[in-house]
């Protein structure tokens, strides 16, 4: 069983599929992808995203606002809880800190992250955390807001083993994207070889960050197989075993009986 634990299906380029989402889904399923988690990055596009995927039982959703999204509707705990109450919703996020793309006073990012953690704790649903160039502050806020009570995943992980270990100690999972296939990502590949198998997820982050050999092209959920193949090779195991273990981890973390 192969699961893409993090993608943005409302942003995927459908032109190769005659701009037909049902055709895209047909080919994705034929490629062996059994389930996808379509992740929210802002509140304005959430209703359209939900409408797009709702007819497909093999797609779950999350509710949240990306740390790089600004000058639009700011989330509060009540709004996130309302969205999280939908039966297809399995998580809060993506949320977190990103100091790579943002400049100036970033207190708004920190406060937004805290709001998401509070909502996840109240909803009893896991967090999907994005972190870039903010290792210490991400972990600090997670500890201060008792994020371990909600649990969750550090998605599209690009940090070092020390951060991965700290997140694992708080009960979080680590998710690897197509970046792990890049030749210049040896430190990340070393982390992928060390993370306990029962705490690992795989993802595409489609339509971004396509894996080798599709680098530079639009990413798609069917390329999650390349992530699985790379990590399986790093760990000296069968791809099917890696895929099945990460699928079990997904079901456990997101309390999702898969269709």
Image (cartoon, grey):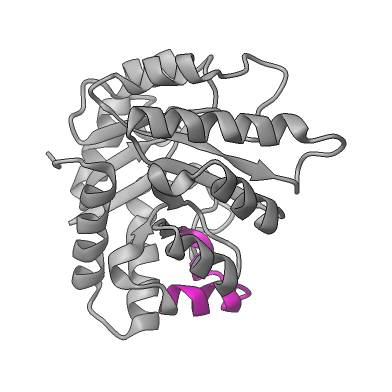
Q: Split into 4 quadrants, where in the image is the C terminus?
A: top left
Q: Quadrant of residue 51?
A: top left
Residue depicted at x 37% and y 58%: 202
Q: Split into 4 quadrants, where in the image is the N terminus?
A: bottom left
Apparent side of residue 6 relative to residue 60 in the rendered image (left or right) = right
Q: Is residue 137 above or below residue 190?
A: above
Is residue 9 visible from the viewing direction of this image? no
Most frequent secondary structure within the magenta stretch: helix
Is residue 73 visible from the viewing direction of this image? yes
Chain part drawn in magenta: 176-193
Horizontal and vertical percent for residue 94? 50, 37
Front residue of 200 and 11: 200
Front residue of 88 and 92: 92
Residue depicted at x 38% and y 73%: 231
Q: Is residue 5 above or below residue 124?
A: below
Front residue of 244 and 127: 127
Count of marks, rendered view = 0
Residue depicted at x 49% and y 31%: 118
Front residue of 189 and 75: 75
Q: Is residue 40 above or below residue 165?
A: above
Horizontal and vertical percent for residue 109? 69, 34
Is residue 187 a member of the stretch shown in magenta? yes
Is residue 217 a member of the stretch shown in magenta? no
Apparent side of residue 121 relative to residue 129 in the rendered image (left or right) = left
Horizontal and vertical percent for residue 179? 53, 62
Horizontal and vertical percent for residue 54? 26, 21
């Amino acid at each position: 069983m192969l699961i893409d634990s993090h993608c943005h299906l409302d942003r995927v380029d459908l032109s190769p599929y005659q701009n037909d989402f049902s055709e895209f889904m047909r080919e994705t399923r034929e490629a062996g992808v059994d389930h996808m988690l379509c992740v929210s990055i802002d509140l304005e596009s959430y209703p359209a995203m939900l409408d797009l995927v709702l007819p497909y039982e093999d797609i779950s959703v999350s509710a949240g606002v990306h740390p790089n999204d600004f000058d639009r509707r700011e989330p509060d705990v009540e709004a996130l809880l309302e969205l999280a109450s939908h039966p297809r919703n399995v998580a809060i996020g993506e949320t977190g800190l990103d100091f790579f793309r943002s400049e100036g006073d970033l207190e708004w990012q920190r406060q937004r992250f805290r709001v998401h953690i509070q909502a996840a704790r109240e909803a009893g649903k896991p967090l999907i955390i994005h972190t870039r160039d903010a290792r210490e502050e991400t972990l600090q806020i997670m500890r201060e807001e008792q994020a371990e009570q909600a649990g969750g995943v550090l998605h599209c992980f690009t940090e070092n083993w020390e951060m991965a270990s700290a997140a694992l100690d708080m009960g979080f999972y680590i998710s690897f994207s197509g970046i792990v296939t890049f030749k210049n990502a040896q430190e990340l590949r070393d982390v992928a070889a060390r993370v306990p198998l029962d705490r690992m997820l795989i993802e595409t982050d489609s339509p971004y960050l396509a894996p080798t050999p599709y680098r530079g092209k639009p990413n798609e959920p069917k390329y999650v197989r390349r992530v699985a193949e790379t990590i399986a090779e790093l760990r000296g195991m069968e791809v099917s075993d890696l895929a099945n273990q990460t699928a079990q981890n997904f079901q456990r973390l997101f309390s999702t009986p898969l269709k």
